[in-house]
Amino acid sequence: MYSEKVMEHFANPRNVGEIENADGIGEVGNAKCGDIMRMYLKIDDNRITDVKFKTFGCGAAVATSSMATELIKGKTLDEALSLTNKAVIEALDGLPPVKVHCSVLAEEAVKAAIKDYYDKNGIENDLDASSCSSCCGSCGAESEK
Amino acid sequence: MEKRFVYADNAATTRVRPEVLARMLPYFTEVYGNPSGLYSVSRDAAVELDRARAKIAGLLNCEAREIYFTSGGSESDNAAIAGIARKRGRGHIITSKIEHHAVLNTVKALEKEGFSATYVDVDENGIIKLDELKKAIRDDTILITVMYANNEIGTIQPIKEIGELARAHKIPFHTDAVQAAGHLNIDVRAENIDMLSLSAHKFGGPKGCGVLYVRRGVNPRPLIYGGGQESGRRAGTENLASIVGMAEALELSLSGLEQKNARVTEMRDRLIDGILKIPYTRLNGDRTRRLPGNVNVSVEYIEGESLILLLDLNGICASSGSACTTGSLDPSHVLLALGLSHEVAHGSLRLTINDETTDDDIDYILDTLPRVVDRLRAMSPVWERRPE
């Protein structure tokens, strides 16, 4: 059901861990739904110089987190903000339809971490940090918000 | 420890026993006649069909004419439940909250057709609440259907008591015994069972073959219409090779069952005790009233599917009741019925062993699992938030 690339990223995830004194930290998802992603960014001169992640979730959640970190490392913040879940899926040679929401979470984790950096530094932005924007509502998290 | 291949998902399906396969093969190329035919190759087939029926009847303690061959557990469940419902036309069905989907979704479909249903709760160990079951009985109750043993957590239900209750109220009682058949001694007479489903591939037989036992006098409407096979109750040319294999597999499974179960239970308990040494784990289901080969634990702060994938990379085949593995967005309805939170249900792990499992397999699982759990917890953002 998973592509070889997904399995390879699941078996050997890139950039796992934390960054001490990270410039931006974003966390999306919730344990009730079964996936949480937290992303740490080191930012120098509007460029992502280092990125790490921690994920609680299925194989696709781990693989999309890993791929998203690879895709934004070394990129400018604007470039990272233009990362779409579709790009993550393509880079992984596809995802099963029920796992597409994992790629959305990965995209949102990147945005949440950048928003955290902007907010901390008083940089105006209109980024939406709400998680599970693709939420199906089945886990009941919607009503808890 | 050297990497091995350990198959620990026998509740999903089992390896066909080599003796069973050998017994089946002549019915593909030699005794291939349609049992309904009049010539010798068909008569030979019909004789074997009768033999298999008589053998299975003997093992369940019923009459041969009470055994109907089907395509497996799901068909048997559908045929029993929808068959009674359609015969009665209207009424109320009682079942439990932890049934297999073959039962649950059949009852739900019947609700859409105008039948009513009660889904009786289970206690925290997964045993049906008999007092609630008793209270659920109404004047218009037409069927009680409760599984013999649960496919996820292995709990064994008080079938005889439920059967007594049903009989006292003159309500037909069906049990889905797909996980129990071949693993426990079943006596349909002594246990007051009116209808019972079983499936060959759960005890070393082939896939796509099962039985519906229907006690004489209970007459569910057929599910499949056509020719007059199975006394007009189930049309379609009989799957003879598989039926012969199923009878052989059931006999093999039940011979020396006590000794086999003692050994499997010992391995199961060693597995449970070993896994529970990992911090933040819990056993799901009753500790003793459970199938000899079933282990179901929740490993907190990790998600089940990634646990299964990582075990697979280490050669271990297991399953989980997490949302990601149920193919839906909710974790297992069985684990939720025990009162587990979504979070804990997502981290469930089911290992199902049988008499082909070895002590070395158990050692290997107990050596591998803690490392796999550590690795996933190390990358889990919720692990660091655990209460001290």
Image (cartoon, rainbow, N blue to C red):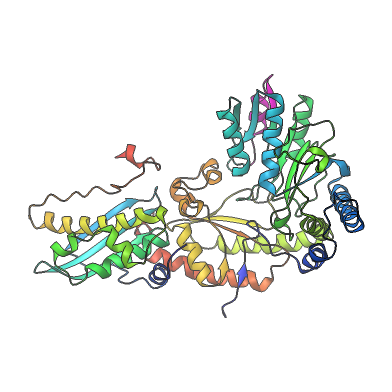
Frontmost residue, B377 versus A112: A112
Residues drawn in magenta:
B127-142
B29 versus B360 height, above or below: above
Frontmost residue, A96 versus B119: A96
Quadrant (top left/top right/bottom left/bottom right) for the C terminus of chain B: bottom left
| Percent of width and height locating residue A92 | 35, 67
Residue B147 makes an appearance in the image: no
Figure quadrant of residue B382: bottom left
Residue B79 makes an appearance in the image: yes
Residue farthest to the top, as pictured? B139
| Percent of width and height locating residue B95 | 64, 34
Frontmost residue, A120 versus B97: B97
| Percent of width and height locating residue A56 | 38, 58
Residue B97 on the magenta segment: no
- B247 sits left or right of A1 in the view: right
Q: Residue at x 37, y 54 (%)?
A: A35
- A106 sits left or right of B232 in the view: left
- B365 sits left or right of B258 in the view: left
Figure quadrant of residue A62: bottom left
B314 versus B243 height, above or below: below
- B273 sits left or right of B303 in the view: right
Q: Residue at x 78, y 25 (%)?
A: B170
Quadrant (top left/top right/bottom left/bottom right) for the N terminus of chain B: bottom right
Frontmost residue, A121 versus A126: A126
| Percent of width and height locating residue B90 | 65, 23
Residue B128 on the magenta segment: yes
Q: Residue at x 79, y 26 (%)?
A: B168
